[in-house]
Amino acid sequence: MALVLALAVGAQWLGWRLRLPALLFLLVIGFALGQWVTPDEIFGRQLLFDGVNLSVAIILFEGSLGLKLREVRDLGRPILRLCTVTAGIAWVLITLAAMALGFDGRVSLLLGAILIVTGPTVINPILRQLRPTRRVSALLRWEGIVVDPLGAILALLVYQAISSIGGSSIGRGVLDLALTLLVGLLFAAPIGWIVTAMMRRHLIPDFLQGVIFVGVAVGTCVGANFLREESGLVAVTMLGIYLANQRNLELEPVIEFKEHLQVLLVGVLFIMLAGRVTPSQIGDILPTGLIFVALLVLVIRPVSVMLGLTRTETTRQERILMAFMAPRGIVAASVASIFAMEFSESANHVREQAKDIAGSDPERAKQLASFADQIAGMASQVDRLVPLVFLVIVCTVAIYGLGIGRLAEKLGLASASPRGVMFAGSPAWSIDTAKTLRDLDVPTLIVTRRAYDLYAARKAGLRCEAADFLSEYATEDMDLAGIASMVACTPDDDTNSIASVHYRRALGRANVFQLERLDEGDAGDSTTGTAQILKARTAFDPPTTHSAMDKMWRSGKRVRQIELDENHHTWEQFRQVMPEAVVMFVVRPSSVNVANVDMNEPKDGDTIIYLGDEWKDTPEPAPAEDVEPKRQTMSVPSSEEAVRDRIDADHKAAVEKEKAALGVDEGVPRPAGAAAVHAERAGLKPEVRDEEPVRPHFDELSPGRPSPMSADSPSEW
């Protein structure tokens, strides 16, 4: 067991490192370990499958905690159609395909019910790596989590129908399905209400929240199954959705704990279930299985999605991506394994019944024996379903996991290798930096509510969100498609730190940065500064505060780029010639890195984006006479800048008019206004002062709107 745990974690780390589906490594490890010792020998068959059922319940509960109903405001109809019409069409088509390949009709119905599921165990890792648009992500997650328990219920109903003497009518099957769903819903509702009430009254301490939620999920699954078989998965899914949509209910610690638990459970389950399948079983089913997989990928999924989503609010690109995204996961593997065991036990149980009544009712015993032979015949085909389902899992995970990124990129719905940059805040230099990155084909996103910065960014053609980046929309619903890293660059260090801590979950701790804090403590004094856990990595090389960056910008420094080469522009030469430049980004062909003091040294071919003076091989001579520097503005004039320019022009015009009216000689400086007239009449030499035009704050021109020039905190922006 210790070996399985270590290998499960190691395989998932290897998948992340190589940017490949970890499921492939887990299945290969499981097949290999199964040749040495099988899970049945270690745990026993019954204990193994009981553990599988409870683990699947925990996985579905964790996935459903992330399903927000507000995600379906514009996707309600497509999601409903995916979970009903698309699933129904897929069931029929999979059944027909299995029958065409020689499976019994009843076994084909069972296989169709098993393979309509996808599941969060395979969808979430792909979404984490791909990071598609919010709409596509919501469609895939809702389909994967909601259809999983429905597929398990349908498989159970089919099994009950074909394993009971006399069969079962369609009406009875529909009634059983409705009763199972109703039991799951009614059982989950009061438990969800009790847990919510306890959380809001702080009756569950923080250190127990994670384990208590696991216990609640397991208890809900077992209790619902006790009332109605296979209603447990429905109950835990409904419970998770109920808790996820309660207002003012803090579930972040619980979700983080269960995400870690899910990663461990998925790894262990796939290794154990794969260990029950031998290479000879895979070899026997391989020719038929490959044809079946081709039908699933090229015909069944595209047809079912296109028909199911016809005339819905989805775009053509979204339907195409959904048509080629349906990897199968742990639910399909576990349900197939469980029903293979159930068929064998059912045949033996019917034979025992036939023997018991052979003396008292020989005719009935003969019928039971004949029915037992039918079940045994189906059991041999059901045994072939297990390696077939595992072959489907391996092939679909490989096909979709390796190919979906390129398809999504061509459709404009995601990036195969996200490398975009999000700026949380909008100082002038960040807008110019975003433009420079955009010119290098790097996606950018600026999140701010400052009106004149939004105007400048949009006029420059930059992607931006008019939102406070700590708002509920920004933290939960904002589309981060194509974004790989974040730089928090507001004037408030604490706001930057709070944002950085939150976005770690979405982007990863290694990819979240903030400007250097003003209160950075001494290296050897732990009583000063801010704890590392409460802030992000410090951006840029050398680390620079917001005020220092702003001062450099106002002094005339600009955002520039230069490509390093071994002849004229090496990294060493750059640092010698431009010692005061702040390096912000290092752009490589396959990645964009936020510069920092711990980064690897840039190499030839890398493009450096920095704030500073232009790098000139031969310095130009200084100008002969001083020229009054122009007031620096953003690269695209904002509304505030336009107002100031107009005020300056009006002021100069008024001064010239007053000079003309007083007959002032251009060569003799005179004070403007009434003071000059009185001084002249008194025969005094007026005092000459150089006065700058008065530039009012933005709030003086637009009452009620905060002045960006005087804002010291995000709440004033």
Image: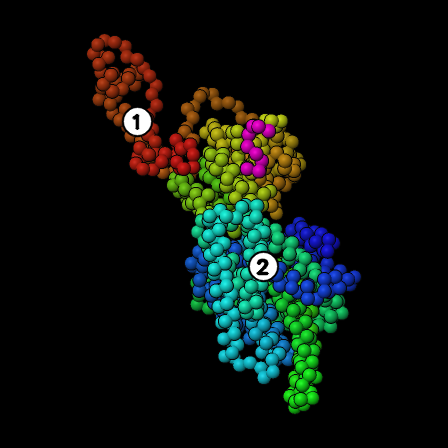
Q: Is residue 237 magenta?
A: no
Give amino acid for label 2. Val
Does the image show residue 631? yes
Residue 308 location, x and y as percent?
Answer: 49, 69
Q: Quick one: label 1 or label 2, which is nearer the N terminus?
A: 2
- The residue where tag 1 is placed is 652
The residue positioned 58% from the left and 82% from the top of the image is 167
- The span picked out in magenta is 526-534
Query: Viewer-proximal residue, 651 or 486?
Result: 486
Q: Is disc 2 placed on a helix, strand or loop? A: helix
Query: Viewer-proximal residue, 513 or 572?
Result: 513
Does the image show residue 324? no
Give yes or no for contact between labels 1 and 2 (Cβ–Cβ under 8 Å): no
- The residue where tag 2 is placed is 218
Residue 353 location, x and y as percent?
Answer: 67, 82
Q: Give the quadrant of residue 689.
A: top left
